[in-house]
Amino acid sequence: MKKILIINGPNLNLLGVREPDMYGKIMYNTLIDELIEYGKQYNLEIICFQSNHEGVLIDKIQQAREACNGIVMNPGAFTHYSYAIRDAIASTGIPVVEVHISNIYKREEFRHQSVLASVCIGQISGLGIYGYRAAILYFYELLK
């Protein structure tokens, strides 16, 4: 079975609580359970991970080299300034889809720039939690 790692960065553990008008009312654990079940429809093992700490996220990206076929990553605010995460993605050789629940291009100007986009295979922004499903479906098509 192909494995897809979903990595969520800072504050995503607060889904359903933090700014529900922007990020939705679904709780983080419910989202994870739904994504795992969604992946099963496509014979994909979905592994989920969340951290508020940059170095821990980098470690997880590097570990994925040996264990995963793709990464779906919502890096949160690290999107806009973490060259360290960018370099970790670039070094893995694993395809990464960058996902954002909100449309980063309709928000504050500093959020319009992603330092990760150039090393990701694609970016999904503004589709709410359905962006994760779109990324999983993309990997299904890519890996079959």
Image (spheres, rainbow, N blue to C red):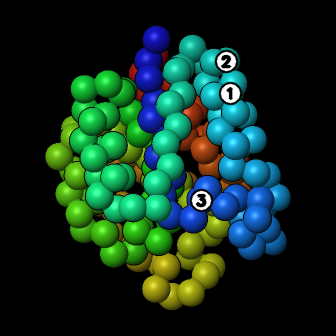
Residue 123 seen by the camera: no
Residues packed near mark 2 inside 10 Å, few (<14), some (14 to 19) or many (20 plus): few
Cα–Cα span, label 3 and label 1? 19 Å
Give the residue drawn at x 75%, y 41%.
Answer: 30
Most distant residue in the bottom direction? 109
67 with respect to 107 (left or right): left
Q: Amino acid at mark 1?
A: Tyr
Name the residue beneath numbered marker 1. 38
Mark 3: secondary structure: helix
Question: Which of 2 and 33 lies nearest the eye of the viewer?
Answer: 33
Q: Is residue 114 above or below residue 16?
A: below
Mark 2: secondary structure: loop
Residues packed near mark 3 inside 10 Å, few (<14), some (14 to 19) or many (20 plus): many
Report if the CB atoms under discs 2 and 1 are less than 8 Å apart: yes
Give the residue drawn at x 65%, y 39%.
Answer: 32
Q: Earlier in the sequence, mark 3 or mark 2?
A: 3
Report if the CB atoms under discs 3 and 1 are less than 8 Å apart: no
* Residue 111, percent from left and from top: 49, 79
Q: Earlier in the sequence, mark 3 or mark 1?
A: 3
Q: Which mark is residue 41?
A: 2
Q: Is residue 25 above or below residue 45?
A: below
Cα–Cα span, label 2 and label 1? 6 Å
Report if the CB atoms under discs 3 and 2 are less than 8 Å apart: no
Image quadrant where residue 68 sits = top left
Most distant residue in the left direction? 91
Q: Image quadrant for the C terminus?
A: top left
Residues packed near mark 1 inside 10 Å, few (<14), some (14 to 19) or many (20 plus): some
Name the residue beneath numbered marker 3. 12
Q: Amino acid at mark 2?
A: Gln
Residue 74 seen by the camera: yes
Q: Amino acid at mark 3?
A: Leu
Mark 1: secondary structure: helix
